[in-house]
Amino acid sequence: GAGVSQSPSNKVTEKGKDVELRCDPISGHTALYWYRQSLGQGLEFLIYFQGNSAPDKSGLPSDRFSAERTGGSVSTLTIQRTQQEDSAVYLCASSLVRLANTGELFFGEGSRLTVL
Amino acid sequence: DQQVKQNSPSLSVQEGRISILNCDYTNSMFDYFLWYKKYPAEGPTFLISISSIKDKNEDGRFTVFLNKSAKHLSLHIVPSQPGDSAVYFCAANPPGAGSYQLTFGKGTKLSVIP
């Protein structure tokens, strides 16, 4: 597609439920990133996928968070047993090569998650 | 520990005047700095960047200045236009294996008043 596509754009869920957020990166981009932005905060790195390499999960805040990337393209971020502190905008980004001082990540519009 | 700090949450500027957005960082290992711009309900978009080996980078109305000794960078927008109204994020890129882990500031909301 023309840009990074994320779905759903908005998700309201009850505490304790599981949610899945989807990201479809720009075609041909080998690197995919998940960030989240909580209210009043900057963007927080969550996870990074590069080609067929093992993902860097070092930013995931707890073991309730997991992500996968199928076929080197679409990625799904799963949050199990959601908590109110998980409420945030979850942003996916992709880039053509691993970000190595080239500067540019292409972000999707984000998925706004609200946990009641 | 916030490694990239944008101490001004908001800034208002008259159209046609200069907008100066500031960013401070604590990690001297950062070697590349970026500015992203974000409109409501949209993802951030890359605006301009600067390598630590430079002290200035200019792109049209946008100029980024880097003062390594002060660990400070700034984004200048001249002249400011109403369409520049957005949230601006400063980000830094550490060298090495974790270079994809951009560290972002909390953002500064710029309002350009017509």
Image (cartoon, helix red, strand yellow):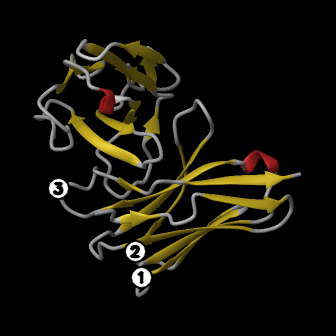
Q: Quadrant of residue B103?
A: bottom left
Q: Quadrant of residue A50?
A: top left
What chain does badge 3 belong to? B
Q: Which mark is first along the chain, 1 or 2?
A: 2
Q: Which residue is mark 1?
A: B68
Q: Quadrant of the N terminus of chain B?
A: bottom left
What chain does badge 2 belong to? B
Q: Which residue is mark 3?
A: B97
Q: CA distance from mark 2 to mark 1?
A: 7 Å
B34 left or right, relative to B64: left
Q: Are marks 3 and 2 on the same chain?
A: yes
Which amino acid type is marked by label 3? Answer: Ala
B112 left or right, relative to B59: right
Compared to B13, does B87 lie above or below?
above
Q: Which mark is first along the chain, 1 or 3?
A: 1
Compared to A44, does B8 lie above or below?
below
Tell me the residue at 78%/62% (across/down): B13
A115 left or right, relative to A112: left
Tell me the residue at 33%/73% (across/down): B26
Question: Could you say whether the residue bearing mark 3 is in a helix, strand or loop?
Answer: loop
Which amino acid type is marked by label 2? Answer: Ser
Which amino acid type is marked by label 1? Answer: Lys
Residue B52 circle label: 2
Q: Are marks 3 and 1 on the same chain?
A: yes
User: Residue A47's x, y, as percent?
Assistant: 23, 37
Tell me the residue at 47%/29% (across/down): A108
Tell me the residue at 26%/56% (across/down): B99
Question: Could you say whether the residue bearing mark 2 is in a helix, strand or loop?
Answer: loop
The answer to whether mark 2 and mark 1 are in CB contact below 8 A is yes
Q: Are marks 2 and 1 on the same chain?
A: yes
Q: CA distance from mark 3 to mark 2?
A: 18 Å
- Whether residue A95 can be seen here: no
